[in-house]
Image (cartoon, coloured by chain):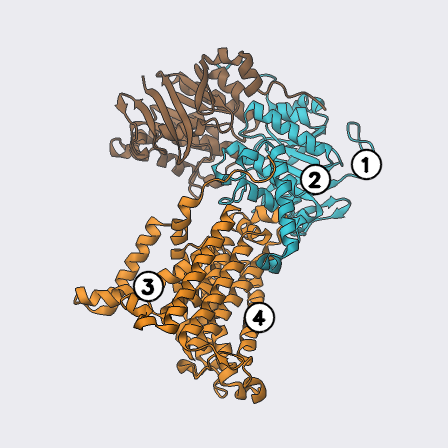
Chain colours: A cyan, B orange, C brown
Amino acid sequence: MPPAGRPGKASAPLLEVRQITKAFDGLVALQDVSLEVWPGQIKGLIGPNGAGKTTLFNLITGILPPLGGDILFRGRSIVGLPPYRIADLGIARTFQNVQLFVGMTVLENVLVGFHRHMRGGLLDAAFRSRRMRREEQDARERALLLLEEFDLLRWADEPVESLPFGLQRVVEVTRAVATAPSLILLDEPGAGLSGGEKVRLTQAIRNFCRDGITVFLVEHDMELMMGLADEVAVLDQTVLIAEGPPAVIQNHPAVIAAYLGEAEPTDAS
Amino acid sequence: MKRLSANAAAFLLAAALIGAIGWLEGTRPGGLSLPRLTAGLVTLDLLIRAGVFTIILVGLNLLMGYAGQVSLGQAAFYGMGAFFSAILTVKARHVGIPLVLAGAWWWPWLVMGLGAALVGGLAYLIGWVILRLRGHYLAMATLGLGIAVFIILRENLGLPRLDLTGGFDGVVGIPRLHVGAYPLWPVHRYFLLVWAVALATVALGLNIADSRLGRALRAIHHSQVAAETLGVDVPRYKAQIFAASAALAALAGSLYAHFQAAVVPATFGFVPSLELVLMSAVGGMASIWGAPLGALAALHPPELPRTRLPLTLPAPRGELEAVAFGLLLILVLLFWPRGLAGRVSGPLRRPLPARGAG
Amino acid sequence: MPLEVRDLEAGYGYLQVLRGISLDISPGEIAAVIGANGAGKTTLLRTLSGLLRPARGQVIFDGHDITGWPPERIAALGLIHIPERRHLFGPLAVEDNLLLGGYLRLRRESRAAIRDDLETVYTLFPRLKERRRQRAATLSGGEQQMLAIGRGLMARPRLLMLDEPSLGLAPLLVRELFRVIAELREQGQTILLVEQNARQALQIADAAYVMETGRIALRGPGCELLTSPVVQAAYLGRSVAPGR
């Protein structure tokens, strides 16, 4: 049953994490974590550094195998599938420590995002088949449109590593959206962005959510998080300690103690 | 689009040069010849070798410079192609191929194609396994592969009674190639053939580099994890490009065998594999044009000291030559880390305005 | 005046990023630089620390004209830059990372003096003391940031330049970090702080600069810029509407 605040028409969650456990060298990273992401939702995930947020993203995208528990996407288990198969099912992501393709331009990075919607193989490429050229032209046009939407068009032909760090994150979001996923996992997309840039990013996230992409978001900027998310889950020291609408989470005593700290900070000077 | 037209210009220039050299050597107008014009520094023999290496290096650059997968055993595939052609043309009888087939003009061509396909297929299988390794481990595995193949060739494929590879002595008497009754010989005709194939390979390489596949390879190079989460089937693409590079090396091996008319295992050992990597680095690994540049550059510097040094320095030749070559190599890599191709294209590389929309 | 910058211009090849920057930092103050991505904040720090050669202008540090000096000489004078990606020695223990921060001082000072400073850093960041034997690569993001700052402090900087220290830190840790930065000032440390977390940076800054396209567009005391409507709109992201 979708709780209040979730779009009513969906009858089943898009992503279901069931009692997931993960450990590294005997050190527990996630313990019995269960949560759901519903279609059309913007779901937030917060928690202190080292709480296991990125680990959860790595498990969902198949980069790491879980120790126990199950992950279902559209009702089917995706545990054990290689990352590229999971991407093919429609889950895209960005990385906390930015994983762009250095040496390639911004446009080329985004074009890799279109990879799974293109078909040209080795022989098409070697002999420039007509199909391949048409496909290439089409992808290029769509990539430029996407770059325009994310306010990156003027950087299109720059080597991606020459962009300021904050904008590199936005390129990663653009690249992930290019895969036309049904679920996108964003790992701290706002880090390193100025206030104005965050406002534009927020708008872009809302836009692609409206276009049918469900969002699962890790972010430390509470203003951004609370302004975007319909529902927020809180991880602390490997376990889920709270889940609910942003307003409730912001005033949740355990969340304040573990993560937010007391209300607005007073002037430190 | 600008880069494409630069490529087209480079092709026209290369084709014109090759044609001119072929014509010069074919007609020798007024007794002029390539060695005479270049004071003995450039010969068709050297240029044919450079053409053969270009074919290998296009594959190697795609594998190492684009996909970022090191191969220290590429000469193994080169040798497999060479011996495949040598055995199935010279010793066809020994393996039970009737003379009607083996005597036909198209037989060596068929063998050449078959060899490339088989070696490519074999590399695909090997690649599926060893390309799971990364960095140093992959380098070690390919090194081992190269040495293993060299030993197998030297030891007569483990079947001394058949004596297919000829052991240390190799196979001699490999026939020249014909098209119908027209021989691709004397040497200037063979030169034109090799460079036609080499340029075609460069064209294929450029096409691959600037495609969905080329981008996927570069993506794998810089972040395998990110590539996978975008839907790139990493193991398959790695195996594919490994196979393609092996097939090209095998093709080059066949062309070499029919040129040299004799093949010995030592040509395809560990040192030649290393030399290929060095040529690739000198030319510029991350560039397709680096292949011909590296092949040409790496063949000539050793000639330079060999022909010039003895006149100026009365020293033991062999050693000084190696030292001079080594020094040149260090200098190139020190000052032009992106190789000769980076040197040539560097000043041309300006950010282009975004094409299309906007 | 520890640092005087006059009409500084710098960039990458054909791309000019800094278009004439002038600023003065007084001893014991926190100077904050805020601005959008691409405004040139990181480039400014790189130029000051010598990683990038200025095309024009002058940098005077502690009475020395350090314009165009190589980075190791500038660092030896005590101008220490902590870049936004932390560049820790991952396989080494926390304590070894810290000791390497004091490496340059070994020429003139005793090991004992450096050991003393180690204790000072541990008092500032108790977390690092708890994890002194742990490899740096296994620290969480926040702890790595603390280690990067701690390592910078081990060099006894006369001016500490921090590039986005709060990047990727949880709110509680961000607050802890700014507390430490303020505490460092109490101890007399001069700090140049580049931050996207504009609100908190402006709250503790004595002097603040807003950079736009390679120039300083606005300057003033931190608290003053905090209330400027221009700054609020562009850098504090005030217009993020709540809810959907």
Residue picked out by circle 1? A10
**Of marks 4 and 3, the one in the foreground:** 3
**Mark 1 Cα within 10 Å, few/some/many (few <14, many 20+)?**
few
Query: How far across and how far down the image is residue A88, in percent?
Result: 68, 49
The residue nearer to you, when weighing C90 against B355, is: B355
Residue picked out by circle 3? B300
Q: Mark 2, chain letter?
A: A
Q: Mark 4, chain letter?
A: B
Give the numbered dot on residue B117. 4
**Mark 2 Cα within 10 Å, few/some/many (few <14, many 20+)?**
many
Amino acid type, callout 3 = His
Give the structural element (helix, strand or loop) at label 1: loop
* Whether label 3 touches label 1, CB < 8 Å: no
**Of marks 4 and 2, the one in the foreground:** 4
Amino acid type, callout 2 = Leu
Residue picked out by circle 2? A183
Q: CA distance from mark 3 to mark 1?
A: 70 Å
In the image, residue B208 sits, relative to residue B120, either above or below, namely: above
Amino acid type, callout 1 = Ala
Q: CA distance from mark 4 to mark 3?
A: 32 Å
**Of marks 3 and 1, the one in the foreground:** 3
- Upstream in sequence: badge 4 or badge 3: 4
Res. C81 in view: no
Q: Do circles 2 and 1 both sit on a common chain? A: yes
Total number of numbered labels? Answer: 4
Q: CA distance from mark 2 to mark 1?
A: 14 Å
In the displayed orientation, state which residue is furthest to the front. B30
